[in-house]
Image (tube, rainbow, N blue to C red):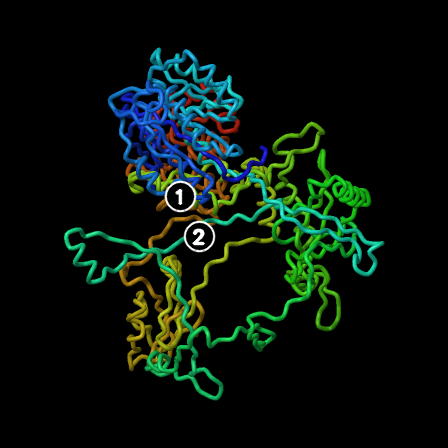
Amino acid sequence: MPAERAGYTVTMFLIDVSPSMAATRTVELPPTPSGEERTTEMTNLEWALQFVKLKIQEMIFNGRKTDQCGVILFGSEETDNLVHEKNGGYNHVTEFIPIAQPNASTLAKLDALQPSETSGDPIDALIVGIETQNTYLEKKRTWTRKIVIITDGQSPMEIEDWEATVKKMNALNIALTVIGIDFDDDEFPFHEENKSSIKVENEAFYHKLTASLDNGLVGTCVFALQEIARPDIKQAKSALLGTVLRLGDVDVRPEEAIEIPVKASKCTALARPKSWKKFSQREKTDDQMEVDEEEDKVVFAQLKTRTEYYIDHSTQEGEEQDTGSDDEEDKDKNLEKVEKEQLIRGFKYGSTYAPCPDGQFPRLNTRKGIDICGFFPAKNFRRELAMGEVQYIWADPGSPQQQVALSSIVQAMYEKGVLAIARWVSKDGMDPKMGVLSPSIFTNIDCLLWVQMPFADDVRKYTFSSLENLVSKSGEKVTKHPYIPTEEQLEAMDKFVDAMDLSGLCGEDEQGEPISWYDTRLSYNPAIHRTKQALFHSAVVNDIASNPLPPPHPELLKYINPPRQVLKDSRDAVAECKAAFKVKEVPKKTVKVRKDNHVRARDEDEDMLLLDQKPAAPRKGKGKEPAASQVPVSPKLAHAAKKPADSDSETEEESDQEPLLLEKDKRPFNALPTPERSMSPAVDPGRAPGRIIGSTYPLRDFKTNLAQGDVVTKAVEDMGAVIKEVVLRPFASRRHKEMIDCMVAMRDTCLKEDEVDAWNAFLRDLKESCLEEAGNSEFWQEVQKLGRSISLISQPEAKKLGGHSEFSESASEAFIVQ
């Protein structure tokens, strides 16, 4: 995609407001948090205006004064356009919004649009748009011209002299885009049935019109709305900034030096998400309250930061800081406010500050330009040290002699395989930057690429002791140690690394080289694009609650998760690594409560972890443990608990797992804290050893484990075992519905996560077990009532999601009915 100049564009939106645009349609909304599907009703005009508003928001978001637009309506009740005023005959076409830089009021005006009761001619609107745009850009011939038509294709058209219109649009280099509501699109694909004859003819004409233009396009609205949410990186032309490239000392030895005038432009640019602004309700003054008594308006204003400077005398040298109860009051008394003008800028140097009254130290006497300091082999370049943006260094476009000179340097560096160390000064007297120049040879031009590198003092070098060669305190070499991997562990890790290889997943190119799965050009920053999508959506819809933010575009999530095929192929290697390294889940540690009544903030899942623990068993002693220590106690009540005076029993020493201490009696208290809202003991999850799915809440455990990470295979295996155990237990009829829900969730997961074989094996085993003499035939009869949807996964089903099954569709249907 060729780079175009940012801004300097006028886009005309021609919007159809004919009566046919009042037809309503059902639009799908994102599902609720519980997974429930939602829809809403809106007119075709409201639906299509979302595309226009998103396009205009892009202009507002960029904030360029040279990015402008105008809106023309056709099918309006009134007539107001410059062509009608001059020649007449262009009825029901209105210049709704004149060409200008869009703002918030532009979106507000579009929200107020309603379908009319009169039809309009799209060709009349197109001619009006061309003339309006041409009149505005009469003295701006280099600007880019775009026209977008939004229509449902139901309005009649006069197409007698359309060739003249095409000729003029090509002469003015106008790009035309037609966004049709429910237009046919073979590539999307979409085809509307029972289409009216008028729409069929109009749609065919739009395709003929755009095909005759040098730059024309027809698309369906649903595809346009989908594509406008796609992450997009726009390539814009960077301004050329003049500087000088020097090789050698032009002052001392000018006969041995070279000085070439060059131009610098950006090759890459750092993109950041838009900064957030804080707004607050503005308080009204007495005068405003008198004026606005009748109208109770709420006005919001942007909050701006304000910095105040204070000197804290309480922490000055020779004084002790008070820690008493009046600490806050004393602290306020010791603060002295100072003005910014009284302060002197200082720079930290070690543990002290070096004052700099002028705000900065004297600058070096530098001269503008890029000085080449030396060359080094390109193989020694450390990519991890490159910092900042990349710049192009071009020869002066207006000087062929300088182009040849720079090209000779580039060709020589390329043939020798070297890079140049360069010192760049942007302006006379500015701080220098050190970087490297790399030769870059294009088809018709040679240039250099510049990237900044850190100074030696900016690079931190951290050294670590060897992981392979360990030496004991006596100086002897240690060969066996938990930190030294064994041959088994090394082999297991090698297999795991090989199994996670991403090369070759996308086939091979023409030269037979594997195509990389990850492409940096197609990897987008979610922080930028998702924030932008949320910002745009909130401005387009009227009610964010009834029309919530849609999910991210699939392209944004393309590289978030690793390929399923690689995960599946690496499962055996992962299991081998876990066994070789003895990987176990580390339980979360509870922090010990301080003795000075300090209340520590509790984590979200801390209560659950505490409930899962068991009190320590008391040691044998003369007396018995007090009854109070046998039940959980609230943290607020723990400090008030006392040991009976007549008790001389002994208890275990205090441990990290028993965080509460008695305030007056310092002996440890074995009771564990529980939330105050619940004094009941924890519910047994019913998890058998080695399982991650319990029999108490199997469906909840299943969903929780799937959300946590790559444990699909284990979760499916354990879920199948739990379902079979529960179904074959006595009195299992009470949980039949619950087990069927578990089976539905398990089948859906197996289908999506390529665990087809696991589901089919489980279902066959379950059927055989249920139909045995001591089984549960009643449960299997309830499963049969669900029919084909719960049966074996067939090959056509699995193939849709990239899986494989050994069962045909007929075999799957026969299995559930037999």
Q: Residue furthest right?
A: 255
Left or right relative to 685: residue 316: right
Q: Is residue 491 above or below residue 210?
A: below
Three-letter amino acid code at the position of disc 2:
Ser
Please name the residue shown 72% across and 41% down the image. Answer: 399
Residue 189: x %, y % from top left = 45, 22
Residue 605: x %, y % from top left = 38, 57
Q: Is residue 571 visible?
A: yes
Q: Is residue 427 above or below residue 505?
A: below
Residue marked by disc 2: 275
Three-letter amino acid code at the position of disc 1:
Ala
Q: Quick one: label 2 or label 1, which is nearer the N terminus? A: 2
Along the line of sight, the residue nearer the viewer: 188 or 663: 188
Q: Residue furthest bottom?
A: 318
State the quadrant of the C terminus.
top left
Dot 1 falls on a residue whose secondary structure is helix
Cα–Cα span, label 2 and label 1: 14 Å
Along the line of sight, the residue nearer the viewer: 269 or 189: 269
Q: Nearer the viewer, mark 2 or mark 1?
A: 2
Dot 2 falls on a residue whose secondary structure is loop
For label 2, the crowd category at 10 Å Cα-Cα, with few meaning under 14, some 14 to 19 and many 20 or more, is few
Along the line of sight, the residue nearer the viewer: 566 or 162: 162
Please name the residue shown 83% across and 58% down the image. Answer: 253
Residue 175: x %, y % from top left = 49, 26
Q: Is residue 86 above or below residue 405?
A: above
Residue marked by disc 1: 534
State the quadrant of the N terminus.
top right
